[in-house]
Image (tube, rainbow, N blue to C red):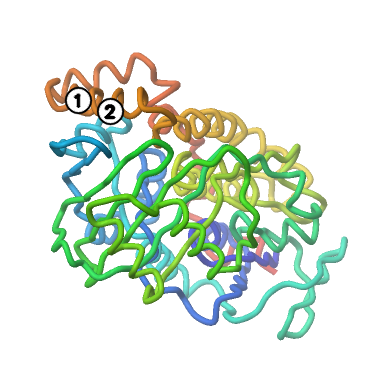
Amino acid sequence: MKVLISGASIAGPVLAYWLTRYGFTVTLVERAPALRKTGGHAVDLFRPAMDIVERMGVLEQVQHRKTGTERLTLHLEGGTRPIEVELRRILGAVSDRHVEIMRDDLSEIFYDATRHDAEYVFGDSITSISEDGEVTFERGEPARFDLVIGADGLHSNVRRLVFGPEQGLTTWIGGYLAVASVPNHLGLDGRMEVVTGVGRMAGMYGAAHLYDARAVFLFRTPAPLDYHHRDVPRQKDLLRAHFGGMGRAVPTLLAELERATAFYFDSITQLHLDTWSRGRVALVGDAGHCPGPAVGGSTSLAVVGAYILAGELAAHGGDHTRAFPAYEAEIGDYVRRSRKFAVNAARRVVPGSRFDLWAMGQGVRLINRLPAALTRAASKIGSKGMRLHDSIEPKDYPAMAGHSREHPLAT
């Protein structure tokens, strides 16, 4: 069977990895002219995704490319003394198996693991998909595929073509995130600097394999902002307006925006679809079930979702009428719990009042004083909350694990 995947970042290559091993013929089309290698921003892989990474045989590469950020220095606006905290104390309460890695590094690892088995087409995009699988492209010749998978992010082109406009499918949960490449003028090595105030948070971090650093901005607004997701100048103006007057290194970070070689800005938005498939088309990763950038563990969710989708397609012999509903049933609980987790995280990660700001400082100081083992034990009591990811156990698909491209499904 021939499968077309739109998007070559995270979910797309993971899906391609497993599908090719189950005997499917896979093509990935990516709008960008080449694999992105600007570093991207830091993302988290938690236990279920790490287990899948290990099954893919790329665990060593992922661990080698981890950011190495181990300490956080937190400055509260209006405060006089910074708060130092070991990040493993916070992350250890969330997951027993975790790696932070730059998104583009992770994408490159997945690409290298699949480029010899799947066909990659860069610099092109899908323009139409018919009910019988006929696909047209901006540049390439039309072709027919048995299945088409949208793995092309929150602003998915495939979702727009098949499910309709984004408006009405998304729910804004109150905030915005921006990341920009900046010179590492603070000489950060294994440490992150953050300044937090009411309604806004700005920080800077480096990574073991980056020659520069990343500035990160999170802020809340009472109502959605008016901008287009591709209007970068407008997005930078919004950052200057919302972070004006913030002290410490923030003015320097804002001044570097014009020179940033990598820049990302988006709303913290959730997708709410009744189904993630229609006919021969299915959605995976942020294209189908984004819980919210930076707050919902969307990268781990994308890896798990891609693994399950491939497994169900193989388990049902490529019959999408059975495989797609089975995929949705398997991933559904994880998606819904991730949404709930993200809404709560969005409210807490950026203080909404002076009291919330004070409470954040007290909470971080308390984490520093508690033994790490006690922190982990306390978090396990509420495993459906903080330890959401570690409570997920994706189905094993052992019957298909040894299949090759000579599997009878291949045509």
Query: Observer-nearest residue: 226 or 346?
Result: 226
Using a 10 Å C-alpha cutoff, classify the residue at mark 1 as few (fewer than 14 neighbours), some (14 to 19) or many (20 or more): some
Are dots 2 and 1 in contact, CB under 8 Å? yes
Up the image or down, 61 lies above or below 199; here it is below
Determine which quarter of the picture holds residue 372: top left
- Tell me the element at label 1: helix
Q: Is residue 53 left or right of residue 19?
A: left
Query: Observer-nearest residue: 192 or 398?
Result: 192
Q: Residue 110's spot in the image, x, y percent?
A: 42, 64
* Tag 2 residue: 93
Up the image or down, 214 lies above or below 72; here it is below
Q: Residue 409: which numbered mark, if any?
A: none
Quadrant assignment for the C terminus: bottom right
- Tell me the element at label 2: helix
Determine which quarter of the picture holds residue 386: top left
Q: Residue 259's spot in the image, x, y percent?
A: 37, 76
Quadrant assignment for the N terminus: bottom right
Residue 18 in view in this figure? no
Residue 321 in view in this figure? yes
Q: Residue 389's spot in the image, x, y percent?
A: 42, 33
Q: CA distance from mark 2 to mark 1?
A: 10 Å
Using a 10 Å C-alpha cutoff, classify the residue at mark 2 as few (fewer than 14 neighbours), some (14 to 19) or many (20 or more): many
Judge depth for marks 2 and 1 and give the one in front.
Answer: 1
For the point 56% across and 65% down, the residue is 234
Q: Amino acid at mark 2?
A: Ala
Up the image or down, 75 lies above or below 378; here it is below
For the point 41% across and 44% down, the residue is 49
Q: Amino acid at mark 1?
A: Ile
* Tag 1 residue: 367
For the point 18% across and 22% down, the residue is 366
For the point 63% across and 59% down, the residue is 227
